[in-house]
Amino acid sequence: MVRRFPIVVAIPVILLTVLVSFSIFINIYYSDKIFNNRLEQSINETSSLISLMQQMGEVYLAKDQKTELVHVFNSAVSHDQLVNLQFITNDGLIYYSSLFEQVGKEVSTVELNKLMLINSNQVEVNSDKTQFTIVAPLRHLSGNLADHVGYIKAVFESRFMHDQVALEVKNNILKTAVFILILMLFLVLVLYFSVHTPLFALRKSFEKISRNDFSEPMKNSMWSEFSALAVVGNNTRLKLSLANKEEALLAKIFDISKGIYISDQNFNLKRGNQTFSSIIEQASHEYMNRNLREFQLLDPEGEKALMLGENWQMELNLNVKGTHKIVKSSISRVYSASDVFYVGVLNDISQERNESERREKAKDEFVASVSHELRTPLNGIIGMATLLGREPLSEKQASNLTNILSSSRLLLLVINEILDFSKIEAGKLKLEKVTFNFKKLYKEIFSIFENLTNEKGLEFSSYIDPDIPEELLGDPVRLQQLMNNFCSNAIKFTKQGSISISLLLIDETPTQASIICNVIDTGIGIEKSKQNRLFKAFKQEDESTTREYGGTGLGLYISKQIVEQMNGEIIFTSEKNKGSTFGFSCVFDKSKEKTQEELIKHPVPDRSLNNFTILVVDDNVINVEVAKSLLEDLGASVEVAFSGQEGIDKARQISFDVILMDIQMPGMDGVEAIMKISELPSKNNYFKVALTANVMEQDVKRYLQSGFDEVVAKPFNISDLTEKILQHHFSQDFDER
Amino acid sequence: MIRLICLLVLLPVLFACSDTPQKALKIGSNVWPGYEFYYMARDKGYLNPEQVRLVEFSNATDVSHELLNGHVDGALLTLDEAVRLSVLGLKLKVIQVVDFSRGGDVVMAQKSVTKNSNFKNKSIAVEASAVGALMLTAFKEHFKIKGGDLNVEYISVDESKQAYERGSDFIISFEPFRTQLLNLGAKQVFDTSYVPNLIVDVLVIREDAISHHSEQQFKHVVNAYFRALAEYEASPLASAKIFSKRLKITPQEVIDSYDGIVPAKLSENHALLQGESPEILHSIEDISDILISSKLINGKVDASSMILADYLPKK
């Protein structure tokens, strides 16, 4: 990392360093000169001192006052720089010396000769400038002036001076440094207020801008440079502020949970938000400039529509990197001043879709389970009651047993209605479209109701229009259910009078027949004000009706749904205490083929099951007992098994004509068991009937696919079952023949 | 922060600016065997010339003169001279006793004398100095000589030989002139061994020098003396050889001269200068009395203010 310095400190420090260095250099450079000056000055001073002593010495010597002469010399001894002061006579004797031991000694001849050559004062500075010597000859005042009577030789040291100069230089440098430092501190202050403060203010403003806060205006400064910067900065700030607002708006749009993208007029992607990226699982640099079609976002049809200026909406099934996604897509053409581009919105609904599917499935499973659990015991009740009815009973017992049976059947009806209702709610009520004999179907239904109506002491009349075509396409089971509902209601709510049913052909084309059906009773009728709630789920005329007549209130609701599924209309009129008319009108397609049933229909000679060997497999003991008893009553020889495995074992040993297999069993279930039985090498043409409480449509299909010949819902009707067994048996015989 | 550090660093430098190079402490002296230990210390390097500089004068008068004028910071003097200078108004401190004259100062005579001798109209040559006065007073007291009996001739001490030759009856002198007189046949009739602590050599300093020099400098010079003295005591002859060069007498004569001049040991210094009532105090008072009676000084001195034992090495 590069070390950075604040300008406010760095510049003064650099200046300080330079100036102090310069000052040191100058001082050192001139110190030598200063020393030389000082030395010269010192020599001059001491020279004049020596000159004075010289003159006094000459006088004292002339007067022979040697004590005074010594006194003069002594007065100079305490001189700060004096090293030695000597008086040497003209014959070389040291007469006086400030170093006492030299007194009385003689100087060397060489030195004496040197002294003799001196005419006036002589100054000698030694090479390292630590000392200098002054020699002053004393003239012979009382004799020949040219003769010397002696010499004053004084040695002075200059070391002290040297030190002093060095110290002065040091002090000078320090004083200069301190001065420069103070100057620098001042400069720091000036820089701080003139440069740092405005720069800091600008920086703060910029920092705020970097955080998208444009509130801090850049402060103006007294310095033109910063002032200009502040003006430019403020302009930039305002522009950025504006741009930021637009950007924020755009970001808001682009940040929604839907994927948004923009393409150019050639459908090449130009921009997309984060959600878009995550839907197509491509980073922006990956999809940039690529065509929408590459990402399955557009097909030729959509392209055409968009080019015509239309919006294009579509539910897309995308395969993104192996994952299936359901995406709602909508693309619109947008015009700008100079350009055409397309804006698309994607909404990933895969998760919701999966979730709702999962919920639906759970609900179905629940309904199936409830249905199964209710039907199983009901099968036992009805079966056992039926068996009981074959015993000799007292009148009272027979009556009670009838009540048990009717209550059980009612309960079965309720269960069926609730199942239908849940189908309707799930939107899964699907009607079959098979060829059936309309008139025959209704004749059978009417015959049943005629009996019931007569039992209640009511009059019954029916009319079937002879022009109604024989073969129509439709769902005979649901049509029967419709008639059941209407007729049951009519019988239920009518205490006296009559019930009449009519089927009329009101229109016919070569392919279709419009039929109207009415069930007219003279029952309690329904008040006008309560009529409109009749066809709603769980509603009857009012709560009292439910208490008095029972019922779930689902019958009419289901009827209405069935009619609507057939694209027909419900007919309903009623008058309180006069009676009601329920019915429907519907258009049926005519069938071009004959009813299959009729082709293979064989007369069933005998309803007994003599000589039939039947295997009943069920884990529920009661159900096994019911089936066994009912079938044995009809003359069949019945074997029972309580699990799939046991059933297989029995099938291996005995050759059966019919196998009645429960589906839901612990361990091996009915489907698996029947498949294993089919694989057995022995006789293979059993009549395999799934006897189950699982009657949901998809289950039935599955059972038929896995090898069952027939599926009978529990609780089963013994005569229906017998019919089916015999039908199968005779068709087999017929085929063999 | 940086500024604060700069200031802190440079503050001591600012104070240092006012400093000047330390001046050497100048101690003046004349030539005297008792003072030779300082010169020996200097020659041996015990005395750093940058701290203490010894300035030699050819006589004591010039030493006093230079001390009075402030050309030197301290001096090696006789105690009486110190008293005299004090009375003149010079504030001095005695920081060390250098030696005692125990026979060093003498009265030499043409012929031997006794207490019963007639001193009337006899001449006595004496230096017009305090020592002269002290010796004269002690001599007179010793021989019970009356006031006007002796004719006093004033000489300089280095003129002792001439005075003897002129025929002065008594000459008050000291080494090396004593030896010279003895060689001429003079008789030593009195010396300071009769009057201990009367003639004492001391190291004095000007009171104003204390503020201009560091304590270390004063301690340095005192220490150097005792170091040289210890060396002399260990091997007198070797040291005497050094002394003889300056004193211009033979080493044996140097050793002999210390019969009369006894260097003051550290323990003696402590006894003389320290304590509630230092011994030197009485000497100062005695000397003061004598000098007053000889009319050499005209006032008493505050003896206690003259004593400063701070620079002596600890016991």
Image (tube, rainbow, N blue to C red):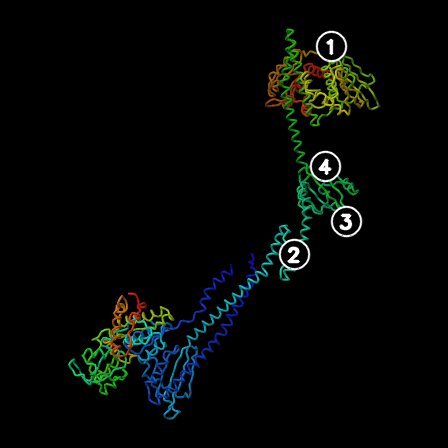
> Could you tell me which chain the residue with mark 2 belongs to?
A
- Write down the quadrant of residue A160 in the picture: bottom left
Name the quarter where the C terminus of chain A is drawn. Answer: top right
Whether marks 2 and 3 lie on the same chain: yes
- For mark 3, give the secondary structure: loop
Which image quadrant is residue A734 in? top right
Q: Quick check: B117 above or below B272?
A: below
Label 3 amino acid? Ala
Which chain contains the residue that carries disc 3?
Answer: A
Label 3 vs label 4: CA separation? 31 Å
**CB under 8 Å between callouts 3 and 4?**
no
- Give SS at disc 2: helix
* Residue named by callout 3: A337
- The percent position of residue A90, horizontal first and vertical second, equals 36, 88
Residue nearer the viewer, A711 or A448: A448
Q: Is label 4 on the same chain as label 2?
A: yes
Instruction: Tell me if I can see residue B110 in this picture.
Output: yes
Q: Secondary structure at mark 4?
A: strand
Q: Is residue B88 above or below residue A712?
A: below
Depth check: give the residue in front, A688 or A153.
A153
Q: Chain of mark 4?
A: A
* Image point (32%, 67%), residue name: B310
Residue B118, percent from left and from top:
16, 83
Of mark 2 and mark 1, the one earlier in the sequence is: 2
- Which dot marks residue A233? 2
Q: Earlier in the sequence, mark 4 or mark 1?
A: 4
Instruction: Mark 2 and mark 1 in contact? Answer it, CB < 8 Å.
Output: no
Which residue carries the number 4 mark? A315
Earlier-in-chain disc, 2 versus 3 = 2
Is A36 left, or right, of A466 in this rendering?
left
The residue tagged 1 is A457
